[in-house]
Structure formats: C-alpha cells, structure tokens
Image (cartoon, grey):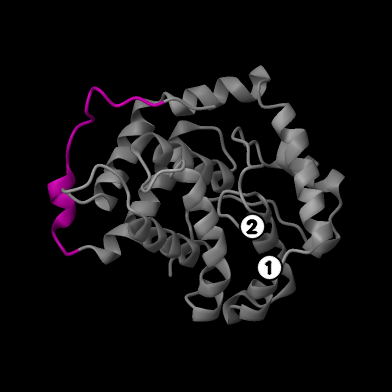
C-alpha cells in the first residue's frame, strides 16, 4: 500500500492518551490550519483530527514496518476521558467557524472550480450509470479502501474496528436519506482533505483527491476505464457549504 503522498503531519513524540485539551486545541488551531468543523464526526472517523494525531504518535511508539495491529485496535477504543477532551476541543473550534480567518478560505475551497471538477471525476468512478447518488454499499466499500490507504493495513480485525465509524459517517452524509447525493459527497470529501492535507491551498486539495482516485478507486476498476472519464466540468455543478 503506497504511503499517502499529499498528506502532512506534525511529529509528536508522546503518548496520545496523555495529551491535554489545551494541546489538542493548539494542534487544531495552529499546527493544523483546518477550516471545516468536526464535532459531528465520531472520534475514529477519517474526518476527525484525532485519527491523524494518533497515527502520528504511533509512528514514534511502534515499529512502523511491523504494522502494530494491536496499537491500531487500541486507537479505535477511545476512553470516556479522551472523548470528553475531544468534545470540548471541537466545541471551541465550532465557536470560531464563522470568523473570517476560517470562513474566507473555506468558501474559496468550496467554490473552487478545479476542486469541484476533481470531485466530479471521483464521483463518476463511484456512481454507476443507473444511479444519481452513492449507495450505502458503494460508500462503505470506498471507505474501507480509504482506511486501508491511510492506516497502511488490511487486517480483518482492524476493518471490523473501523466499521462503526464508517456507519456513522454514512448516516451523516446521507442526510436521513438512503444514499449520498453529490452536494453531501463534496462536503464530506472536503472535510477529509481538510483533515489530512494540513493545508488551505486548493492545489493541495486537488493533489490529495487525485491520490485518492489513483490509490483507492482505480486499482478496483477494469483496465482502460479511466479513459472513459476524461471529461470537462459540467457548467451546472454547484453546492453550498460551511
């Protein structure tokens, strides 16, 4: 499994379970210039800042090459104290979301035609010709690939551990419906990029989304399929967010 190329990290040589709320908040506001909220995501969601933080800490405490499965499994078992710390940090961040320093770059990302075009390409790989939305089965298969990509493991035990987080993300993204529509998909993927690129630059989001296609979608598609999806952006695509 290739190492995610367009992700950045802040190295922390500490036990993630001992990090204070203040340190968490500092990381979110200073080291990770994110612009999308995360209070609506579970602690083990790929869109929650806890996961990249824990993975970075595990790189210091375990042999990365040995893929310490037990440590990864522990990561999905957040304590009540850990959950409370993150909830408080998320609340602090939510209160700042409307500030220009967050709102302006967020709107630039949401309205970027180049980002929307890349999202549309990914969307077309996930949606078959008979559907206008991403089904629950496709959503979960795609997210299993995403977890494998970011965690670097494909162990059944770990897949079982992240299943509840995938289910929670789907319930949020489908917006009380049966499937995930394009607008919800776009905002969800922007949250994902926001969490892993540690950047507010559109070109970093675009590069990130291209990697997602290359390493999680194309390997599961028949050869020659990508040539059928070389298209220009449809003029009518637009979505709201914030």
For mark 1, give the secondary structure: helix
Q: Nearer the viewer, residue 201 or 40?
A: 40
Residue 14 appearing in the image? no
Residue in front for this viewpoint, 164 or 73: 164
Q: Is residue 138 above or below residue 113?
A: below
> Does the magenta portion include 89?
no
Q: Of label 2 and label 1, which has the lower sequence position?
A: 2
Q: What's the residue at 31%, 58% (across, down)?
A: 217
| The N terminus, quarter of image | bottom left
Residue 228 in the image: state x and y as whole percent. Answer: 13, 48
Left or right of 159 on screen, residue 214 = left
Q: Is residue 227 above or below residue 167?
A: above
| Magenta-tinted stretch | 222-239
Name the residue at 63% across, 53% down.
Answer: 42
Task: Please report the residue visible at 20 percent of the width from the left and 51 percent of the height from the top.
Answer: 128
> How far across and how far down the image is residue 239, in percent?
39, 26
As displayed, is residue 59 above or below residue 195?
A: below
Residue under the image location 49 percent in, 80 percent down: 156
Alpha carbon separation for disc pair 2 and 1: 8 Å
Q: Position of residue 218 (x, y in %)?
A: 27, 59
Question: Does residue 12 appear anywhere in the picture?
Answer: yes
In this figure, which residue is indicated by the disc labeled 2? 51
**Residue 121 located left or right of residue 38:** left
- Could you tell me which secondary element the residue under label 2 belongs to? helix
Main secondary structure type of the part rendered in magenta: loop
Q: Place residue 181 in its image quadrant.
A: top left
| Observer-nearest of 155 and 171 | 171
Instruction: Give how far across and how far down residue 83 sits, in percent.
Output: 77, 55
Residue 75's disc number: 1
The reply to whether callout 2 and callout 1 are in contact (CB within 8 Å) is: yes
Task: Please indicate whether residue 199 sits to the left or right of residue 76 in the image.
Answer: left
In the picture, the quarter occupied by the C terminus is top right
């Amino acid at each position: 499994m290739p190492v995610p190329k367009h992700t950045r990290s802040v190295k922390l040589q500490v036990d993630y379970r001992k990090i204070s709320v203040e340190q968490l908040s500092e990381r979110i506001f200073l080291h990770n210039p994110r612009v999308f909220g995360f209070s609506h995501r579970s602690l083990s969601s790929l869109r929650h800042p806890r996961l990249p933080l824990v993975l970075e800490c595990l790189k210091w405490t375990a042999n990365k090459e040995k893929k310490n499965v037990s440590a990864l499994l522990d990561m999905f078992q957040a304590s009540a104290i850990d959950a409370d710390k993150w909830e408080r940090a998320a609340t602090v961040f939510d209160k700042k979301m409307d500030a220009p320093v967050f709102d302006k770059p967020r709107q630039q990302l949401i309205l970027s035609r180049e980002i929307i075009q890349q999202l549309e390409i990914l969307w077309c790989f996930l949606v078959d010709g008979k559907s206008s939305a991403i089904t629950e089965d496709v959503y979960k298969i795609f997210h299993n690939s995403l977890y494998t990509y970011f965690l670097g493991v494909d162990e059944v035990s770990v897949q079982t551990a992240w299943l509840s987080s995938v289910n929670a993300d789907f319930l949020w993204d489908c917006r009380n419906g049966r499937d995930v529509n394009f607008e919800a998909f776009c905002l969800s993927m922007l949250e994902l990029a926001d969490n892993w690129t540690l950047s507010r630059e559109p070109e970093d989001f675009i590069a990130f989304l291209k990697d997602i296609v290359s390493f999680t979608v194309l390997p599961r598609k028949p050869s020659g399929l990508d040539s059928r999806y070389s298209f220009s952006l449809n003029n009518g695509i637009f979505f709201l967010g914030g």
